[in-house]
Image (cartoon, rainbow, N blue to C red):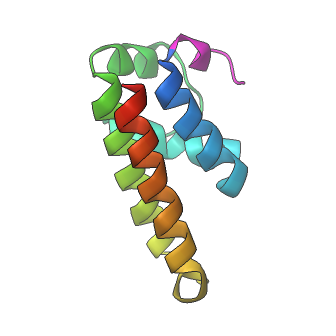
Amino acid sequence: MPVGLSSLPDGVIFQLFDFAINSGIQTAIRHFQKSLGVADDGHFGPISKLAASMRSESDMIMRLSAERLDFMTKLSNWPNASRGWARRIAQNLRYGSIDS
C-alpha cells in the first residue's frame, strides 16, 4: 500500500484496492485525487491527505466510484465488458454503504 493511504478509512482503502487490481495503482490514486478535487499526480501526499480528511468515508466512496465508472466508460473495451464492470462498481457501492 502506498505511503499515506493507510490513514484512510477501511471502506475507502477497499475501493482503492479494487480499482488498483483492475486498473493499476497509479490510475486508482490519480482518480481518487481527482475525486478529492486535488492535482491528480498519482502521489498521495500531504495535500491529498488533507483533502481526504475533510470528507466523510461515504462521500469518498461515492465520489471515487463515480470517477471509476466515468474512467471505465472511456476504455475501448467498455462495449464488451461494461455489464460486468458496472455490476462490480454497484456491488462495491453496496459494500461501501455497509462499511461507512
State the residue at coordinates (37%, 21%).
52
Q: Is residue 65 above or below residue 51?
A: below
State the residue at coordinates (53%, 18%).
45
Please identify the quarter of the rendering in which residue 64 is found. top left
Give whichever of 98, 48 is nearer the camera: 98
- Could you tell whether 23 is left or right of 49 in the image? right
Please identify the quarter of the rendering in which residue 2 is found. top right
State the residue at coordinates (51%, 78%).
82
Image coordinates for residue 96, horizontal then vertical, percent: 41, 37
Q: Is residue 69 visible?
A: yes
> Quick one: which residue is furthest to the bottom in this view?
79
State the residue at coordinates (52%, 43%).
30
Give whichever of 12, 51 is nearer the camera: 12
Magenta span: 1-7
Residue 39 part of the magenta segment: no
Image coordinates for residue 69, horizontal then vertical, percent: 42, 62
Image coordinates for residue 18, horizontal then vertical, percent: 62, 45
Q: Is residue 27 above or below residue 36?
A: below
Q: Count every numbered label the image shows and give the total.
A: 0
